Image (cartoon, coloured by chain):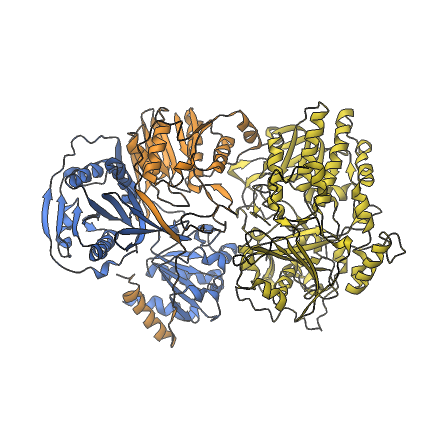
């Protein structure tokens, strides 16, 4: 089983984030960088599949210089090697363009499975895995909560649907699946694993080293801002009975949740 | 998993804690051993998820050690905020600020740098890694490994144990790291250091160590309003004359103002709350004027060793040494310890090289470290201030008089006594006087703009712990908490902890101590100040705790 | 400007988020001019749709479209849109849309700007998205002639949809060569051992003010009456009264439901950061100074033990 895991480096949830002066990005100062949470689950799932069925797990990321850390962490946990795609040219591209870069980088690897986290904690487009499936002619499934290899051509995945419903979907390999957080319990990188990272390879790719890409990037970020919270609290008063009556009215007619 | 399965790692030299002492020591050792054609393996284990995440200080760094270790530090982009450009000392009354017209040279910070310790150790750590030193973050030192009375290494903490003590699916058993020599650079009141000192009676004939807690906030001020390199220290309000300590206010880059309060952990009134004292400081009109239109962005706390020269333990046993704040190499008068921590690491490295060359790691071989310390500027500097802290127990004025007399007599107590003794900080605590009304904090009103309650401050300390683990704070007898301690001291843990970890909840028979361990900022104040000395601070799961970037 | 709105169906009923997207289309059309065509893969909902103010309803009836299959959906939509070169395709950001629309985006090589919370129009359309876990908004625009937009649940209110009439047109699509590599199975429900609160529409949350574990039954009853999920602040979980997955806040789940009803919660910042993006926050707390009132849309200073039982009764009676 040859499995690729896409991992993104994102700011830690508790980092104090500040918009840069140009209003087009988040300042990199004072950020604790971490591997995206759902990507961690995807990595763990990939490692579990490798342990059960043999094969190779390759970690892959696209990002700035510091992103190489997510690859080191993945290899410390058991990924066999990594692919590091980095170029300042890629920094402001939209997700469709990014997916084309990944498709180009991974095209000759012939992965059976590409696994990614459902959504990244920064921009959260949650599209990459699915875009790749189309570009690389693979089957796909999103919101995956369980995996089961059937044979070397088939995988079944448990998908989460709205309202507490689920379904098992059968996919022909190769497949791209995006993994929901909570599917497993991610392992720790052991001391031994960290020491073994020195012996593992990281293939670095930039714009020059990749075949010419047709990136008709048409999406642009115009502005970033802090959401305005214009909140006027409406106080409901009176006797308890009066309060309840007014509140039910609000729930019915203003908030409209009881239909 | 059984003991048989336990993984082992062999290294030549192991450092516990990736702080300035260990990093300087490891780097120096790597270089001098290379020069001596010795290829040795050096490992550092660090309980934080990354280097610097648990590091907190003012700080003002004296570059003396850097000049020895990395003389071209400026060319290597050492991340100092600025050279100290302006120094001020103030005495604060409750309303006014009286500026000292003159600062004695021995207390001047001229030639030093305002810095963030977190940024500094991250920079230093990168240099260490680039020179082949293995730094393992997310691994706590949980147990000393012995062969008879010789330390042969450290066992790291288990990870993946649930709150009932049962292994989870991702259970990762602690590793036994065997080393010829282990250096404990865990910072103030290190947990392994505490055990080592106790077991080998390393404080025999020494003054007990006493500590202070430093509580600080970083403030983002309006553009161009903060002068990097600005330094101010104050005494007086809010601590008054009966509590050792004072505030520090430093100007950093990018309009960040660094404001903190050092509170000696040898005060008498069990109701004293260092966090509240910091909030009171910010009610002072002069301090408030410095914070106008600013936004608090970060909070943290850590203890620091104040005992000085006579509180240094015996520094070595067979197979192990104490360095940095774990030993207590801090100059309380200058309020600087980082350069001394680094120097202690550097001198330890020299001792270790000889030990490696002779393959002798016995206590007598390692006692060369004590000689090196005594022959270096460590002793020269610390000896001059060896009696600085001791007289403050009598009040601010006597303390200043003693300090002043020490200045002109090369450090003699009251100008004439070679060594002043002291007692444990927690022994200064006097039982609650239930008759008197303690109203110091009743006027504090948390507006969420300038003054913050503990819970809000904790949110800004970026602290998190895996909730599903056994609490890392061990109370030897919780019965004392709901009986004796309530009567005698009024449960001071609720006050001295800057992170709201300890909470007495419930009424009547249901009254109990609740430990909100996931708030813990690893300052060790509870371990230090608990009047019954029944609290043992042990490391939580590796990687847990604060995620400070530039405290 | 040609606006298409894909109307998702479930068991013959219109998915409410699609209707909200339709309102979004109307709001855009009001500023930009243009026509609105609804697209549906199920004729059962045409009658309801034709009551709304639309230019046209495009109905694609095909046996293979009866059950959701991303490859089938993508091919069907590809065929529908083949005749048009400049358009905006709008959808509600449902789980289903998340699964197939990116594939469509790559198939047609047009951008998909997903999970938008609103838009601005000033000589061109700019979409607004919430990023970094609700900390910031980003404004995105594209100069692509055709593109896809999905709107987050609650970005628009579907109850303001104007009635009207629309012509209906049948479109046939060729689904014969769609690969069989994705085969969704039967849907089933599971006894949840934990709940993903971030997907809940209504949440009833309790804090320290609930007092003791026994009082939770009152909160549970209210949650049942409102068809809501039960959540709490940290102290309730710490006391062992609720499992950790109920916890909302910085060390728990992040939620943004349509309604967050906070009972006896003071509003410590650790809790607030986990729920202050909720669309409507109703607070009941007897302490008028509780910080949580600062983020409340509706505040009641009162005793939850007096108000909640009456509230439950009133809801059950209505």
Whether residue B525 is visible to the viewer of this picture, yes or no, is: yes
Judge whether B30 appears above or below C9 on screen: above
Which residue of the protein is positioned furthest toward the bottom in this rendering? Answer: A239
Q: Position of residue B104 (x, y in %)?
A: 77, 57
Q: Is residue C307 left or right of residue B315?
A: left
Q: Residue at x 84, y 54 (%)?
A: B421
- Residue B320 visible in image: no
Whole-percent x, y for residue C272 in the image: 45, 58
Q: Is residue C298 left or right of residue C59?
A: right
Left or right: C160 in relation to A37: left
- Residue at the far top: name it: B37
- Expressed as whole percent of the image width and height from the top left, the position of residue C78 reads 19, 38
| On-image quarter of the C terminus of chain A | bottom left
Q: Residue placed farthest to the right in the image? A: B416
**Which residue is nearer to you in this view: B76 or C167?**
B76
Quadrant including the N terminus of chain A: top left
What is the drawing colour of chain A? orange
Residue B442 image-quadrant placement: bottom right
Of A242 and C130, nearer the camera is C130
Chain shaded yellow: B
Name the residue located 49 percent from the left edge and 42 percent from the top edge.
A33
Q: Position of residue B454 (x, y in %)?
A: 57, 60
Residue C14 lies left or right of residue B166; in this view the side is: left
Q: Which image quarter: residue B146?
A: top right
Chain C drawn colour: blue
């Amino acid at each position: 089983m040859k499995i690729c895991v896409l991992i993104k480096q994102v700011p830690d949830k508790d980092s104090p984030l500040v918009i840069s002066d140009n209003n087009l990005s988040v300042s990199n100062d004072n950020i604790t960088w971490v591997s995206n949470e759902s990507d961690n689950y995807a990595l763990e799932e990939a490692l579990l599949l490798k342990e059960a069925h043999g094969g190779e797990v390759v970690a892959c990321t696209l990002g700035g210089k510091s992103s190489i850390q997510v690859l080191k962490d993945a290899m410390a946990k058991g990924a066999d090697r990594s692919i590091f795609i980095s170029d300042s040219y890629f920094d402001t591209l939209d997700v469709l363009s990014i997916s084309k870069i990944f498709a180009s980088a991974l095209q000759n690897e012939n992965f059976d499975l590409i696994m990614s986290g459902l959504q990244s904690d920064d921009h959260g487009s949650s599209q990459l895995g699915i875009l790749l499936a189309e570009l690389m002619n693979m089957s796909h499934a999103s919101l995956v909560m369980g995996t089961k290899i059937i044979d070397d051509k088939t995988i079944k995945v448990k998908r989460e649907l709205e309202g507490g419903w689920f379904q098992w979907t059968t996919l022909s390999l190769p497949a791209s699946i995006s993994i929901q957080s909570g599917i497993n319990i991610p392992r720790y990188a052991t001391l031994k694993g960290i020491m073994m990272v020195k012996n593992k390879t990281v293939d670095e790719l930039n714009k020059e080293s990749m075949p010419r890409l047709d990136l008709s990037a048409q999406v642009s970020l115009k502005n970033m801002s802090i959401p305005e919270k214009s909140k006027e609290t409406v106080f409901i008063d009176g006797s308890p009975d009066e309060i309840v009556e007014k509140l039910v009215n609000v729930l019915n007619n203003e908030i409209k949740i009881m239909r | 998993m059984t003991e048989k399965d336990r993984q082992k790692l062999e290294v030549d030299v192991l450092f516990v804690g990736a702080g300035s002492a260990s990093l300087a020591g490891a780097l120096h050792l790597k270089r001098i051993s290379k020069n001596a054609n010795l290829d040795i393996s050096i490992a550092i284990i660090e309980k934080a998820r990354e280097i610097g995440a648990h590091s907190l200080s003012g700080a003002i760094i004296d570059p003396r050690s850097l000049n020895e270790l990395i003389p071209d530090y400026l060319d290597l982009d050492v991340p100092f905020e600025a050279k100290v450009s302006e120094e001020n000392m103030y005495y604060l009354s409750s309303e006014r600020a009286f500026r000292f017209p003159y600062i004695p040279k021995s207390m001047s910070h001229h030639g030093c740098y305002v810095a963030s310790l977190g940024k500094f150790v991250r920079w230093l750590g990168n240099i260490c890694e680039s020179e082949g030193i293995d730094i393992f973050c997310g691994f706590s030192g949980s147990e000393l490994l012995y062969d008879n009375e010789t330390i042969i290494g450290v066992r790291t903490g288990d990870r993946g144990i649930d709150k009932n003590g049962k292994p989870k699916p991702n259970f990762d058993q602690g590793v036994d790291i065997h080393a010829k020599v282990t250096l404990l650079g865990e910072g103030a009141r290190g947990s392994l250091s505490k055990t080592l000192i106790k077991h080998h009676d390393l404080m025999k004939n020494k003054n007990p160590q006493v500590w202070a807690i430093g509580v600080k906030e970083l403030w983002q001020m309006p553009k161009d309003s903060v002068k990097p390199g600005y330094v101010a220290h104050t005494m007086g309000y809010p601590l008054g004359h009966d509590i050792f300590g004072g505030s520090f206010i430093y100007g950093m880059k990018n309009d960040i103002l660094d404001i903190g309060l050092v509170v000696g952990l040898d005060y008498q009134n069990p109701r004293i709350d260092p966090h509240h004292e910091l909030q009171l400081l910010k009610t002072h009109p002069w301090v408030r004027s410095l914070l106008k239109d600013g936004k608090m962005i970060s909070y943290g706390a850590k203890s620091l060793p104040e005992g000085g020269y006579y509180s240094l333990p015996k520094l070595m046993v067979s197979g192990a040494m104490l360095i940095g704040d774990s030993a207590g190499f801090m100059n309380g008068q200058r309020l600087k310890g980082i350069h001394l921590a680094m120097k202690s690491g550097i001198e330890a490295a020299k001792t270790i090289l000889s030990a490696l060359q002779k393959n002798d790691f016995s206590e007598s071989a390692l006692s060369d470290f004590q000689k090196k310390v005594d022959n270096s500027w460590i002793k020269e500097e610390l000896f001059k201030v060896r009696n600085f802290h001791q007289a403050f127990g009598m009040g601010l004025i006597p303390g200043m008089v003693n300090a002043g007399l020490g200045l002109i007599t090369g450090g003699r107590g009251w100008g004439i006594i070679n060594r002043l003794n002291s007692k444990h900080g927690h022994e200064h605590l006097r039982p609650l006087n239930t008759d008197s009304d303690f109203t110091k904090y009743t006027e504090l009103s948390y507006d969420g703009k300038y003054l913050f309650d503990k819970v809000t401050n904790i949110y800004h300390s970026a602290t998190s712990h895996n909730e599903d683990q056994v609490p890392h704070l061990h109370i030897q007898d919780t019965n004392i908490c709901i009986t004796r301690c309530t009567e005698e001291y009024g449960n001071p843990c609720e006050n001295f902890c800057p992170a709201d970890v300890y909470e007495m909840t419930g009424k009547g028979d249901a009254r109990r101590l609740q430990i909100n361990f996931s708030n813990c900022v690893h300052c060790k104040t509870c371990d230090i100040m608990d009047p019954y000395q029944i609290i043992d601070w042990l490391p939580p799961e590796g990687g847990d705790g604060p995620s400070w970037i530039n405290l | 400007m040609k606006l298409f709105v894909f109307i998702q169906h479930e068991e013959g009923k219109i998915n409410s988020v699609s209707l909200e997207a339709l309102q979004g289309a109307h709001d855009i059309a009001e500023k930009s001019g243009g026509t609105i065509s609804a697209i549906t893969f199920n004729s059962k909902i045409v009658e309801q749709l034709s009551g709304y103010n639309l230019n046209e309803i495009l109905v694609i009836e095909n046996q293979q479209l009866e059950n959701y299959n991303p490859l089938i959906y993508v091919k069907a939509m590809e065929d529908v849109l083949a005749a048009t070169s400049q358009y905006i395709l709008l959808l509600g950001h449902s789980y289903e849309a998340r699964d197939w629309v990116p594939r469509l985006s790559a198939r047609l090589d047009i951008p998909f700007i997903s999970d938008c919370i609103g838009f601005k129009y000033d000589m061109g359309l700019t979409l607004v998205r919430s990023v970094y876990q609700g900390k910031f908004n980003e404004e995105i625009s594209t100069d692509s002639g055709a593109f896809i937009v999905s709107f987050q649940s609650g970005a628009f209110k579907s109850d303001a949809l104007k009635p009207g009439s629309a012509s209906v047109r049948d479109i046939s699509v060729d689904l014969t060569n769609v690969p069989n590599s994705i085969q969704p199975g039967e849907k089933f429900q599971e006894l949840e051992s934990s709940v993903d609160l971030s997907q809940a529409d209504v949440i009833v949350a309790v804090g320290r003010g609930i007092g003791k574990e026994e009082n939770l039954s009152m909160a549970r009853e209210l949650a049942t009456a409102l068809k809501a999920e039960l959540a709490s602040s940290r102290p309730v979980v710490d006391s062992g009264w609720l499992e950790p997955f109920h916890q909302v806040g910085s060390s728990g789940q992040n939620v943004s439901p349509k309604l967050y009803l906070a009972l006896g919660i003071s509003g410590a910042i650790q809790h607030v950061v986990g729920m202050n993006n909720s669309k409507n926050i109703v607070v009941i707390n007897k302490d008028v100074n509780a910080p949580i009132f600062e983020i409340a849309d509706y505040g009641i200073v009162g005793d939850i033990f007096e108000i909640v039982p009456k509230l439950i009764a009133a809801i059950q009676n209505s």
